[in-house]
Image (tube, rainbow, N blue to C red):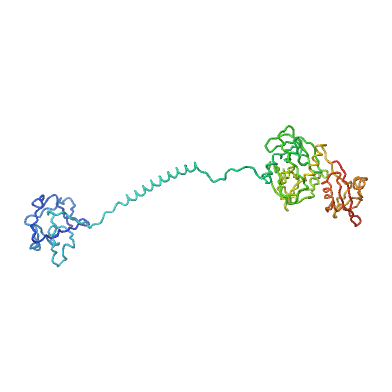
């Protein structure tokens, strides 16, 4: 290998155009030395290695190349030597790349283009046909990553600031505050009117404790509730809708009507509820019930009247029938549960039309004990307020209530349609009380009473319920079946002390 190594790629030299034939000879550059060496000389190739000279030596002496004949002639410029590519390579021993546009191909006459004279006064023109240097890829990638990180960090920080600023000013859409007043005949209006007059009763007795409901009757502190709420009570505490409590005492009670009256003393600001008329109630009328189901005070439920004049009996736990209540009830689908007992059933004007007293529970499944599940299934029953008003007045006045009677003993084992008068009464007495209301009306033993005021009855319980729905002294029309023939009898109800 030659001591000189060609640069990859080596630069190509451009030749200055040939001057005209009549042009004067080019003068050497002012600063150029006579021997052609100087600081402006550009080596033809880079040299490497310890023995490589700093620059190639000038060709002098007997070994100097001889000008090619092509360099002479009319078109040759003085002081400029031209040579073929092969001669140039053989002369200096270096590999010199020539421009294909400058020299003619092999075997052809060389082009009449002078070689560039580095010592001429003309400017240096050099074309680099080598490979372009590319920008460092690593630096570009690093710069992009750095810019991305900075942008992400700044963006995240600005996002946090924006979120914090937004959180401090977060306001969701909301309706404007409106008046709390409601239409008086709406459920909310009825509840707002009646709640101040409804109380919750907490009772403690020998058999434990319980919860019931009541409502204020007058300014003197009388409160009406159910008998089964306070039947075994030793201590009674009344809690008002405001949360204030007071001790109450029992005034009177009646198991036949399942009604009782208690009284609180020294309480101001009582809000008695207005009493309506149960005779005006019709099926489908809207109603509202208020109570404390499962000790949840001031609970409001709503529904309709689903039936009227529904004969029901409740109680009977004592076995002798003394605690059975007979009610010609108002039936409602407003949810009523344990704890609602004694609470008011209200119409659309917030008037009391009934006293919630009983519910019908769902039958238990085959795995049950044959009883009923507690809780509302949409069958609740209320004592009509007309009956409750009369009994409450008697309890407040005397501590006892009277029952209307017709003075006969009924055969409760009779399974036919209607209520049959027994052949004998209790303790061998006559089944029709002598000179009683029934005897004066013409009722006889074994008569079957089928209607009361034109309304059919289907058993002894229903007859008692229909009679107790009236007051002593009321006049009733009874339809009696005797020896296969119906006849109509009028009876004036008598009075008997209740339990």
The quarter holding residue 195 reads top right
Left of 180 or right of it: where is 167? Answer: left
Q: In this rendered view, identify the residue nearer to me: 81 or 364.
A: 81
Q: Is residue 485 above or below residue 213?
A: below
The quarter holding residue 276 reads top right
- Residue at (14%, 54%) from the top-left corner? 122
Say whether residue 383 is visible: no
Say whether residue 251 is visible: yes
On the image, the x and y values in percent for residue 95 come to 17, 58
On the image, the x and y values in percent for residue 247 come to 73, 34
Left of 171 or right of it: where is 260? Answer: right
Q: In this rendered view, identify the residue nearer to me: 146 or 486.
A: 486
On the image, the x and y values in percent for residue 474 come to 85, 46
Q: Is residue 264 above or below residue 15?
A: above
Q: Quadrant of the N terminus?
A: bottom left
Q: Quadrant of the C terminus?
A: top right
Left of 489 or right of it: where is 254? Answer: left
Residue furthest to the top in view is 266
Tally the numbered discs: 0
- Residue at (35%, 49%) from the top-left corner? 144
Left of 186 or right of it: where is 53? Answer: left
Residue furthest to the left in view is 62
On the image, the x and y values in percent for residue 147 come to 36, 47
């Amino acid at each position: 290998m030659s001591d000189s190594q060609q640069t990859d790629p080596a630069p190509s030299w451009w030749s200055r155009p040939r001057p005209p034939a009549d042009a004067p000879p080019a003068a050497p550059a002012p600063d150029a030395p006579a021997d052609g060496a100087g600081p402006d000389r550009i080596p033809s190739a880079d040299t490497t290695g310890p023995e490589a000279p700093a620059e190639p030596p000038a060709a002098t002496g007997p070994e100097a190349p001889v000008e090619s004949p092509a360099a002479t002639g009319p078109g040759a410029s003085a002081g400029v030597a031209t040579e073929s590519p092969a001669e140039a390579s053989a002369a200096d021993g270096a590999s010199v790349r020539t421009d294909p546009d400058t020299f003619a191909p092999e075997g052809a006459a060389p082009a009449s283009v002078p070689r560039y004279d580095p010592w001429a006064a003309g400017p240096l023109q050099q074309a680099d046909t080598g490979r372009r240097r590319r920008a460092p890829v690593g630096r570009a990638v690093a710069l992009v990553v750095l810019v991305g990180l900075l942008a992400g960090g700044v963006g995240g920080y600005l996002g946090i600031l924006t979120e914090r600023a937004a959180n401090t000013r977060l306001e969701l859409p909301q309706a404007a505050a409106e008046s709390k007043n409601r239409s008086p005949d709406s459920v909310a209006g009825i509840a707002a009117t009646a709640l101040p007059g409804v109380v919750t009763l907490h009772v403690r007795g020998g058999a434990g404790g319980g919860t019931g409901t009541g409502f204020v009757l007058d300014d003197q502190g009388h409160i009406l509730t159910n008998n089964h709420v306070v039947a075994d009570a030793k201590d009674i505490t009344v809690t008002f809708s405001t949360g204030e409590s007071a001790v109450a005492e029992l005034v009177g009670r009646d198991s036949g009507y399942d009604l009782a009256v208690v009284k609180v003393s020294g309480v101001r600001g009582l809000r008695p509820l207005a009493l309506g008329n149960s005779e005006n109630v019709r099926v489908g009328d809207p109603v509202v019930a208020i109570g404390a189901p499962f000790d949840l005070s001031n609970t409001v439920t709503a529904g309709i009247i689903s039936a009227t004049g529904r004969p029901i009996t409740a109680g009977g736990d004592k076995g002798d029938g003394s605690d059975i209540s007979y009610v010609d009830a108002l039936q409602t689908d407003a949810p009523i549960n344990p704890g609602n007992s004694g609470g008011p059933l209200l119409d659309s004007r917030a008037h009391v039309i009934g006293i919630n007293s009983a519910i019908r529970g769902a039958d238990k499944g085959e795995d049950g004990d044959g009883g009923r599940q507690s809780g509302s299934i949409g069958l609740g029953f209320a004592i009509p307020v007309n009956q409750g008003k009369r009994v409450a007045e008697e309890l407040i006045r005397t501590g006892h209530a009277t029952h209307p009677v017709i003075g006969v003993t009924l055969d409760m084992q009779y399974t036919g349609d209607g209520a049959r008068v027994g052949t004998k009464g209790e303790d061998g007495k006559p089944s029709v009380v002598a000179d009683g209301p029934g005897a004066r009306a013409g009722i006889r033993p074994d008569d079957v009473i089928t209607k009361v005021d034109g309304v059919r009855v289907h058993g002894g319980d229903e007859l008692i319920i229909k009679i107790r729905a009236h007051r002593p002294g009321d006049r009733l029309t009874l339809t009696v079946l005797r020896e296969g023939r119906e006849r109509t009898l009028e009876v004036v109800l008598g009075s008997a002390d209740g339990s």
